[in-house]
Image (cartoon, grey):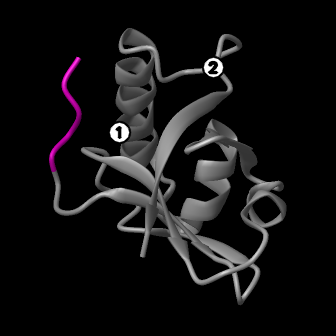
């Protein structure tokens, strides 16, 4: 199942000094990762949205919708469902289907 191809990427931005998490480019489902900015406790900052697992993070699917805010309309949900399907097919979805594995990138 191909992902929609809008413009940049669904990037979960973890700003450690600000103790904040947000989505960058929430409507592009072609790439998915966690961008880590600054120094701090990444596990604690991600805790409301998922969990740290070595060089990866498991991000809760429903947390993505929450982070997307007003962008999470029906069209957005269709894109998210396609991304979840792709993650399932490639082993990037948790066994219970609740979280997607993302690699970590330092920003």
Helix, strand or loop at disc 2? loop
The vertical placement of 26 against 102, above or below, is below
Prevailing secondary structure class for the magenta stretch in the rendered image: loop
Q: In the image, which residues are magenta? A: 1-5
107 or 27: nearer the viewer: 107
61 or 45: nearer the viewer: 45
Horizontal side, residue 5 vs residue 71: left or right:
left
Residue 19 x %, y %: 76, 80
Whole-number angstrom distance, CA of label 1 to CA of label 2: 19 Å
Quarter of the image that includes the C terminus:
bottom left
Q: Which mark is residue 12?
A: none
* Residue for badge 1: 79
* Residue for badge 2: 94
The vertical placement of 6 against 30, above or below, is below
Residue 85 x %, y %: 40, 19
Helix, strand or loop at disc 1? helix
20 or 79: nearer the viewer: 20
């Amino acid at each position: 199942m191909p992902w929609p191809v809008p413009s940049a990427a669904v990037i979960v931005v973890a700003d450690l000094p600000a103790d904040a998490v947000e989505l960058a480019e929430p409507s592009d489902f072609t790439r998915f990762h966690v961008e880590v900015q600054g120094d701090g406790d990444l596990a604690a900052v991600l805790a409301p949205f998922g969990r740290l697992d070595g060089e990866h993070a498991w991000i809760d699917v429903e947390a993505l919708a929450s982070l997307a805010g007003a962008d999470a309309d029906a069209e957005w949900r269709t894109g998210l469902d396609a991304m979840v399907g792709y993650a399932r097919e490639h082993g990037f979805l948790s066994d219970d289907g609740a979280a997607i594995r993302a690699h970590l990138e330092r920003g």
